[in-house]
Amino acid sequence: MTTDLSVFSETSFVVGEEMQGDANVREALLDRAMGEGRRRKSSEKLRCGRLPSAGLAFVARDDSERVIGSVRLWDVSCGARPMLLLGPLAVEPSCAGQGIGTALMQHAIARAADMDHGAIILVGDASYYARFGFSADKTSGVMMPGPVERNRLLGCELKQGSLDGASGLLIPRGRRAGRRQSYTTAERPIVEGRLVQVA
Ligand SMILES: CC(C)(COP(=O)(O)OP(=O)(O)OC[C@H]1O[C@@H](n2cnc3c(N)ncnc32)[C@H](O)[C@@H]1OP(=O)(O)O)[C@@H](O)C(=O)NCCC(=O)NCCS
């Protein structure tokens, strides 16, 4: 009888830009992490048929280059005000609770700020996203194109005041999918962390 001790071994992960070849693995990961219902979310109406905001789609990879986490941001507007929609954020279920979601969020927020975006909104659990600066304080006037629990519609200002008075229906304004996607090929690892290897 043997005991598999690989659950206690460690390996590193990196967060970097999503590559074109990641699409199938990413979608399978999202299905595992979120279930089929993910496609019926109101946020999906803002993403359907669009590409993520340029340079704002990230994955976490383990030592074997396996994609174990994903986060993407999308160009939307609320009234005439441009902003980003974040989501889905998902981590391979067997790797949850090891800081991968945090690394993806921190990286995505930092890159969005670097790129001069003003604000990010998302639909999610405030108890998770509050740690990254998200709250429902300034989203009461924001409307999703479908049902949403208001206490889960959260915003984070990258520029102070960018969500002041935000009001109106969110509409997509991103690049349309269908033509060849333009991804940067420099897959440079940017955020490094440690995780426990799960067999
Ligand atoms: C939510 C998710 C992305 C978190 O990723 P992760 O890599 O496991 O998260 P981290 O390791 O960075 O953070 C773990 C912490 O988040 C907390 N957490 C995880 N999911 C949470 C949730 N839905 N609500 C509140 N807290 C949550 C954990 O309890 C843990 O708390 P601690 O730091 O006090 O111990 C991941 O669990 C996942 O993919 N879930 C399914 C998809 C999903 O629901 N995505 C949207 C989230 S609203």
Image (cartoon, rainbow, N blue to C red):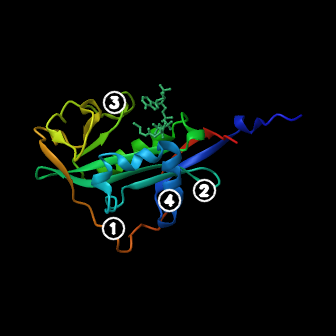
Q: For the residue marked with disc 2, what is the amino acid?
A: Glu
* Residue that carries the numbered disc 3 in the rendered image: 126
Q: Is residue 75 above or below residue 157?
A: below
Residue 144's quadrant in the figure?
top left
Observer-side mark, 2 or 4, equals: 2
Marks 1 & 4, CB-CB < 8 Å contact: no
Q: In percent of the image, x 18 and y 39: which residue is there?
A: 160
Question: SS class of the residue under badge 2?
Answer: loop
Q: Is residue 162 above or below residue 136?
A: below
Q: Which badge, 4 or 3, comes first in the chain's sequence?
A: 3
Crowd band around label 1 with a 10 angstrom C-alpha radius: few (<14), some (14–19), many (20+):
few
Q: Is residue 43 above or below residue 19?
A: above
Observer-side mark, 1 or 4, equals: 1
Q: CA distance from mark 1 to mark 4?
A: 25 Å
Q: Nearer the viewer, residue 193 or 21?
A: 21
Q: Nearer the viewer, residue 59 or 36?
A: 36
In x, y percent, where is residue 89? 42, 45
* Quarter of the image with the C terminus in it: top right
Q: For the residue marked with disc 4, what is the amino acid?
A: Arg
Q: In percent of the image, x 30 and y 42: which residue is there?
A: 122
Say which mark, if any, is on residue 65.
Answer: 2
Q: Which badge, 2 or 3, comes first in the chain's sequence?
A: 2
In x, y percent, where is residue 197? 66, 41
In the displayed structure image, the side of residue 174 where residue 99 appears, left or right: right
In x, y percent, where is residue 133? 31, 34
Crowd band around label 3 with a 10 angstrom C-alpha radius: few (<14), some (14–19), many (20+):
some
Q: In percent of the image, x 26 and y 36: which residue is there?
A: 153
Q: Which badge, 1 or 4, comes first in the chain's sequence?
A: 1
